[in-house]
Image: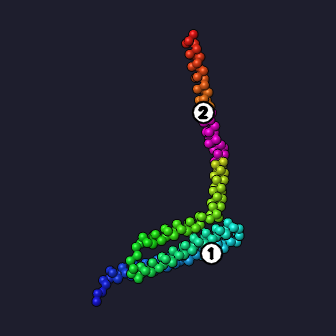
Amino acid sequence: MEHENPQTQHWNAFVEQWNEQFIDAFEDNVETQAQFVESWSETVAELSEDETTSEGLEGYAKAYETWMNASQQMVERMNDTLEGEDVEIEEFRDVWLNTANDAFKDVMSTTAFAKMTGETVGDVLELKQDADEASQETLRTLGFATEEDLLEVGDRLVELERRQQAVEGKLDRILEHVEDE
């Protein structure tokens, strides 16, 4: 009968403890996600019962189901690993990457997501405009040139160049006329 050496025993105990901690943390994470989604769903349902919100909730429910299926698959594969099956680490990565992709599709394909994104972009553009106006006013108050001032100077320079070319053209014609006489 072979006896494991102390280093192997120590390593096996360490790996077993790590696996148990991983599974506990993973289960806690799944439970926390479930609680968040339930809380979020209840809040959104209270806020609005329109068709867009309903469709958005369906998208989030599909995404939640996708995550829960992946979580179950991960627990099963982790158990397979603990039972000695050789499971490639890339398989765990692929499960999460594919799940994230599928869940994002579930959520982002809804009109609720499109509506929310549109509203967010609109809000950001308004904030940017307000910030631009505030910075321009601050620069003006401090006596610095503003973007508006620089654009005006640029427009004037272009107009001066155009006029200069017109004057040069007239001078050239006058000089040709004088030389011809």
Residue 116 lies, in percent from the top left, at 64, 62
Image quadrant where one finds the C terminus: top right
Residue 121 lies, in percent from the top left, at 63, 56
Q: Which residue is mark 2?
A: 158
Number of other residues with Cα within 10 Å of mark 1, as a class: few under 14, some 14 to 19, many 20 or more:
some
**Would you place residue 17 above or below residue 119 in this image?**
below
**Would you place residue 120 above or below residue 33 in this image?**
above
Residue 130 lies, in percent from the top left, at 66, 51
Image quadrant where one finds the N terminus: bottom left
Q: Label 1: state its secondary structure.
A: helix
User: Residue 37 vs residue 26: left or right?
Assistant: right
Disc 2 marks a residue whose amino acid type is Val
Front residue of this view, candidates 135 and 128: 128
Magenta-tinted stretch:
135-156
What residue do we see at 70% from left, 72% from top?
46
Front residue of this view, candidates 129 and 38: 38
Number of other residues with Cα within 10 Å of mark 2, as a class: few under 14, some 14 to 19, many 20 or more:
few
Residue 155 lies, in percent from the top left, at 62, 35
Front residue of this view, candidates 8 and 74: 74
User: Residue 149 vs residue 30: left or right?
Assistant: right
Based on the picture, tell me whether residue 175 belongs to the magenta stretch. Answer: no
